[in-house]
Image (cartoon, rainbow, N blue to C red):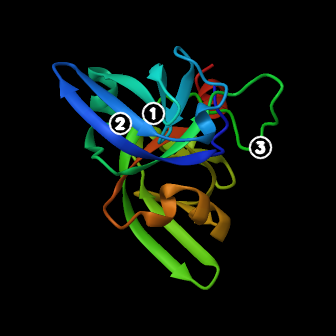
Amino acid sequence: MFTGIVEEIGTVDSITHKKNLSVLTVKAAKVLKGTKAGDSIAVNGVCLTVVRLNKTSAVFDIMKETLEKTSLADLKNRDKVNLERALRVSDRLSGHFVSGHVDAVMPIHRILEKENYTEIQIGLQKSLAKYFVPKGSVCVDGISLTVGEVKEKYFSVYLIPFTKEVTTIGTKRKGDKVNIETDILAKYILNK
């Protein structure tokens, strides 16, 4: 379980594709502290298990299912990724409950920027629309954000300058694909 509060931006050191599996190595610093093999780290909002680590990087095996359902299959050397360690019971919950299980990969439709204002419009799958409400929560590439407008084909999120500085979302462009995880509480309420 995660909160969607990104702790650090890591850098892809290598990604090796094998049959039905990819091995991802990410350079990091903060998220490695206190981490051991077997722990979970959200990489762009995808819950992955650390299989090995050293002082400067963590290694993850990414199974075929994860590669097919997330944007991790598109990663290349030197790409930047959002990183968050799993939530501890004693931690503050600054974002919202995030499982790290991606519901969809959607494109960015439009980015509107003005002074101290950024709105990002992200594609909305019809099958997931019921989980989106204005002022609700959404996780975009591992970032806990508040839903703004909800339209038939897209939803909006609004960014403060801080979020653009400490996550990868400030580098995204129209057409880029992002991992979307809808609010887990909305899923339980609507599917009870």
- Which residue lies under the disc numbered 2? 70
Q: Quadrant of residue 123?
A: bottom left
Amino acid type at mark 2 = Thr
- Which residue lies under the disc numbered 1? 102
Residue that extends furthest to the bottom in the rendered view of this protein:
115
Residue in the foreground of this view, choosing between 13 and 126: 13
Residue at 78% over, 37% down: 93
Kind of element beneath mark 3:
loop
- Which residue lies under the disc numbered 3? 94
Q: Quadrant of residue 16?
A: top left
Query: Does label 3 or label 1 sit earlier along the sequence?
Result: 3
Residue in the foreground of this view, choosing between 11 and 88: 11
Q: Is residue 183 visible?
A: no
- Mark 1 is surrounded, within 10 Å at the Cα level, by few (under 14), some (14 to 19) or many (20 or more) other residues, namely many
Kind of element beneath mark 1:
loop
Query: Does label 2 or label 3 sit earlier along the sequence?
Result: 2
Position of residue 80 relative to residue 73, above or below, is: below
Position of residue 154 relative to residue 117, above or below, is: above
Q: Is residue 95 visible?
A: yes
Name the spot of residue 98 as percent of width and height, x first.
61, 33
Residue that extends furthest to the top in the rendered view of this protein:
38
- Mark 3 is surrounded, within 10 Å at the Cα level, by few (under 14), some (14 to 19) or many (20 or more) other residues, namely few
Evaluate if marks 2 and 3 touch, with contact meaning CB atoms under 8 Å apart.
Answer: no
Residue at 28% over, 35% down: 15
Amino acid type at mark 3 = Ser
Evaluate if marks 1 and 2 touch, with contact meaning CB atoms under 8 Å apart.
Answer: yes
